[in-house]
């Protein structure tokens, strides 16, 4: 049985028991003070909680009718006397239902509920209250209605604000996930496409004069394409099989330990020698830092291959007690740092998400430098 069925059953069950509870409150005991009977009538309305939660206006109408009928059929003679007038106090339960109606339903239902409550309570007071209590009774009823309306409005504002915050959080989470996927796909594909473009150009130029070199270039294109396709497949599988809470989304597949293979592949396939220098302590780091560092170096090498027009570059990886510093430099023509491309923007976002510092721009003496400083958590030091 699902939650909806349970809620519906509770609502119908409470509705069926409500008349019985009213009868017990009114006629179950002979020698009971009127205030106790009024409290019993008000407490009987708790059985209509399920109806009020599902359809507040209908629940309010039932409580008003039940309280009004209870006040008219209440035994009025005997030891206590004046019981019917006291039973009107049970309208407090209707005021609670009215507050919930105002907090959760559209404005037109507010007006209907307020009007019905005012009419029902006024009829009860005018019919049952003693002459000297008419004005005071109506005043108390109106004051109770105003309090219910104010409480309902405040609760409705808090509810609307909470819903807006939840919607904003969901929107920001979706946007962050889209940006993360975009960074992954860009960094994964752009490096490979750059290598493929270079190798295809080599193959086109030497296909007739030096067929062996052309075959090697085509072989490099095939290997790079297969590696990229495998990486894309892993990413898509991770997206399909990720848990709803996002704990398994886009599991990292690369890290600092893969930089040697990346440097070798860049030299072999793109013709750019990478001097990889490591200093500082060794050991694994958190997976998000490992992946971000690898992607930053990968994207920087892609930019060197595409824009620097050099045959060598330098990658320095320095790990201290509190930070991981990456520095990628070349002596080529560089590029403009005033109009960053998608790659530089993605690197900057990666570092920012890890609360680090990032800079990229041309050097005064020529060349281009990318620097990223990523703080290390206590567990990674």
Image (cartoon, helix red, strand yellow):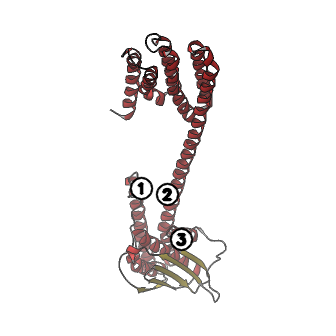
**In the depicted structure, whether residue 247 falls above or below residue 37:** below
Mark 2 residue crowding within 10 angstroms, few (<14) / some (14–19) / many (20+): some
User: Looking at the image, which is closer to me, 178 or 62?
Assistant: 62
For marks 1 and 3 on the same chain, the one whose residue lies earlier in the sequence: 1
User: Quick one: quadrant of the N terminus?
Assistant: top left
Numbered circle sitting on residue 27: none
Residue 169, horizontal then vertical, whole percent? 53, 52
**In the depicted structure, whether residue 181 falls above or below residue 98:** below
User: Looking at the image, which is closer to me, 129 or 225?
Assistant: 129
Judge from the rendering whether residue 241 lies leftward or rightward of residue 117; answer left or right: left
Q: Are marks 2 and 1 in contact (CB under 8 Å)?
A: yes
> Does residue 167 appear anywhere in the picture?
yes
Residue 226, horizontal then vertical, whole percent? 40, 66
Residue underneath mark 3: 347
SS category of the residue bearing label 2: helix
The mark total stands at 3
SS category of the residue bearing label 3: helix
Distance from Cα at disc 1 to Cα at disc 3 = 22 Å
Numbered circle sitting on residue 177: 2
Judge from the rendering whether residue 167 lies leftward or rightward of residue 278; answer left or right: right
Distance from Cα at disc 2 to Cα at disc 3 = 16 Å
Q: Are marks 2 and 3 in contact (CB under 8 Å)?
A: no
Mark 1 residue crowding within 10 angstroms, few (<14) / some (14–19) / many (20+): few
User: Quick one: quadrant of the C terminus?
Assistant: bottom left
Residue underneath mark 1: 246
Residue 124, horizontal then vertical, whole percent? 56, 16
SS category of the residue bearing label 1: loop
Distance from Cα at disc 2 to Cα at disc 1 = 10 Å
């Amino acid at each position: 049985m699902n939650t909806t069925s349970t809620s519906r059953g509770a609502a119908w069950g409470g509705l069926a028991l409500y008349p019985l509870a009213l009868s017990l409150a009114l006629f179950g005991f002979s020698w009971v003070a009127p205030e106790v009977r009024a409290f019993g009538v008000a407490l009987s309305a708790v059985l209509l909680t399920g109806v009020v939660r599902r359809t507040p206006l209908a629940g309010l109408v039932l409580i008003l009718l039940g309280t009004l009928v209870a006040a008219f059929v209440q035994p009025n003679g005997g030891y206590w006397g004046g019981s019917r007038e006291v039973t009107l106090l049970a309208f407090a339960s209707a005021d609670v239902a009215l507050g919930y109606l105002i907090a959760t339903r559209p404005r037109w239902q507010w007006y209907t509920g307020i009007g019905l409550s005012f009419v029902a309570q006024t009829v009860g007071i005018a019919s049952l209250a003693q002459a000297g209590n008419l004005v005071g009774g109506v005043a108390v009823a109106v004051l109770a209605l105003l309090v219910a309306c104010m409480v309902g409005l405040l609760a409705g504002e808090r509810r609307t604000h909470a819903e807006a915050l939840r919607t904003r959080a969901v929107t920001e989470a979706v946007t962050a996930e889209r940006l993360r996927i975009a960074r992954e796909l860009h960094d994964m594909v752009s490096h490979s496409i750059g290598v493929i473009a270079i190798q295809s150009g080599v193959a086109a130029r030497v296909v007739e004069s030096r067929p062996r070199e052309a075959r090697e270039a085509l072989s490099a294109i095939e290997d790079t394409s297969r590696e990229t396709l495998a990486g894309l497949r892993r990413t898509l599988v991770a997206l399909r099989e990720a848990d709803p809470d996002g704990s398994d989304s886009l599991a990292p597949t690369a890290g600092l330990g893969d930089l040697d293979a990346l440097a070798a592949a860049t030299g072999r396939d793109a013709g750019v020698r990478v001097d990889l220098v490591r200093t500082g302590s060794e050991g694994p780091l958190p997976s998000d830092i490992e992946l971000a560092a690898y992607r930053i170096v990968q994207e920087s090498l892609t930019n060197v291959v595409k824009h620097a027009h050099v045959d060598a570059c330098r990658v320095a990886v320095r790990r201290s007690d509190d930070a991981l510093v990456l520095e990628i430099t070349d002596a080529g023509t560089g590029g403009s740092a005033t109009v960053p491309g998608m790659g530089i923007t993605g690197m900057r976002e990666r570092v920012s998400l890890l609360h680090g510092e990032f800079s990229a721009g041309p050097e005064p003496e020529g060349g281009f430098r990318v620097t990223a400083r990523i703080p290390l958590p206590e567990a990674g030091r």
